[in-house]
Amino acid sequence: MLIQVCLYFYCKFLWRCLKFVMRKLTGRCELQRICYSTKPGASRTMKIETSLRDSKSKLLQTSVSVHPDAIEKTIEDIMELKKINPDINPQLGISLQACLLQIVGYRNLIADVEKLRKEPYDSDNPQHEEMLLKLWQFLKPNTPLESRISKQWCEIGFQGDDPKTDFRGMGLLGLCNLQYFAEKDATAAQQVLSDSLHPKCSKFSKAEWEKKKLDKAIGYSFAIVGINITDLAYNLLLSGALKTHFYNIAPEAPTLSHFQQTFCYLMHEFHKFWIEEDPMDIMEFNRVREKFRKRIIKQLQNPDMALCPHFAASEGLINM
């Protein structure tokens, strides 16, 4: 243990010495070197984030958690601290602003997602009830819901006749994600729902199923899996694994819409993965989910990874 502590401080000392030497040789601070030599996106933003957090300056350490409205002033203070003339180095301020908006935005996104997760579904809340009924309408547009408490809920993958009990783990976040998927990607959501109920005759994966033994085809509960995938997305966000994705697709601060688009992507990909795995029965769900989680984490280790760059909110990445 003592050796590890000594090694840590030794390496830290060497790193500070190296930074000092590089500044003298190049005439640029570490922030300048990163911004001028690293392409926009996750590679640059994550290096900037690490540099700021590891700095011995309190100003730089706290810059990653300032209010979005204070970012411009913070950049001015950083430029002054580092003795960088903004007129000679205008690009640096633009690059730092883009990076800080992403860094601060990611922290704020965690807070927004956590707030929804902690809010329990309340059947006495008209807004909650309206969201739930809209979920049914988006998924089953041609089938009226006979009553609020109904076995029909099982048709979209809830466990019983009242869905409110299924939202306990992820709170309102699970419902928000499901409704977003059903509304914004309605055709795909309805197809995935159909596949989950009738995988043996799925048009969406017909070619895939023809290659397999149809007696092994097994479906799953759409809504329950959606809540489970919400849990997966939530933990990827909390662990920081989604930084790579969001820093590559969000030109500024990632928002709740970006998170919900990522959920849609995960639902698409998990559905395909489930078909590829061809489980014997639903009892294999945890095994398949864990294998899927590891695949996504491995993808996110690539600094150039963008899970779903095709979404409208992800178009036109500009990170100067």
Image (tube, rainbow, N blue to C red):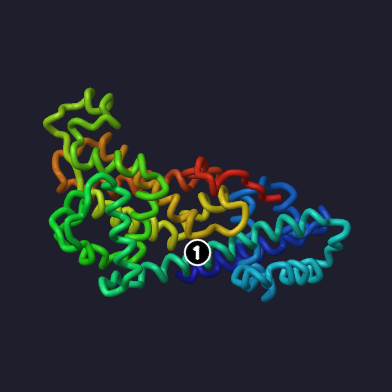
Q: Nearer the viewer, residue 55 or 235?
A: 235
Q: Nearer the viewer, residue 67 or 296?
A: 67
Please report the residue visible at 36 percent of the width from the left and 63 percent of the height from the top: 173
Q: Residues within 10 Å of mark 1 (few under 14, many from 20)?
A: many
Relative to 316, is 272 on the left or the right?
Answer: left
Q: Is residue 48 visible?
A: yes
Relative to 250, is 277 on the left or the right?
Answer: left
Which corner quadrant holds the N terminus? Answer: bottom left
Name the kind of residue labelled 1 in the image: Leu
Where residue 140 appears, as percent x and y from the top left, is: 26, 47
Please report the residue visible at 35 percent of the width from the left and 68 percent of the height from the top: 127
Where residue 145 appears, as percent x and y from the top left, is: 21, 54
- The image quarter containing residue 187 is top left
Please report the residue visible at 17 percent of the width from the left and 39 percent of the height from the top: 218
Q: Nearer the viewer, residue 14 or 237?
A: 237
Up-down: is 134 above or below 201? Answer: below
Where residue 44 appears, as percent x and y from the top left, is: 64, 52
Where residue 267 appears, as percent x and y from the top left, is: 34, 46
Up-down: is 219 above or below 101? Answer: above
Give the tally of numbered discs.
Answer: 1
- The image quarter containing residue 9 is bottom right
Q: Label 1's element?
A: helix
Q: Which residue is mark 1?
A: 109
Q: Is residue 21 visible?
A: no
Relative to 61, is 196 on the left or the right?
Answer: left
Relative to 39, is 214 on the left or the right?
Answer: left
Please report the residue visible at 26 percent of the width from the left and 36 percent of the height from the top: 275
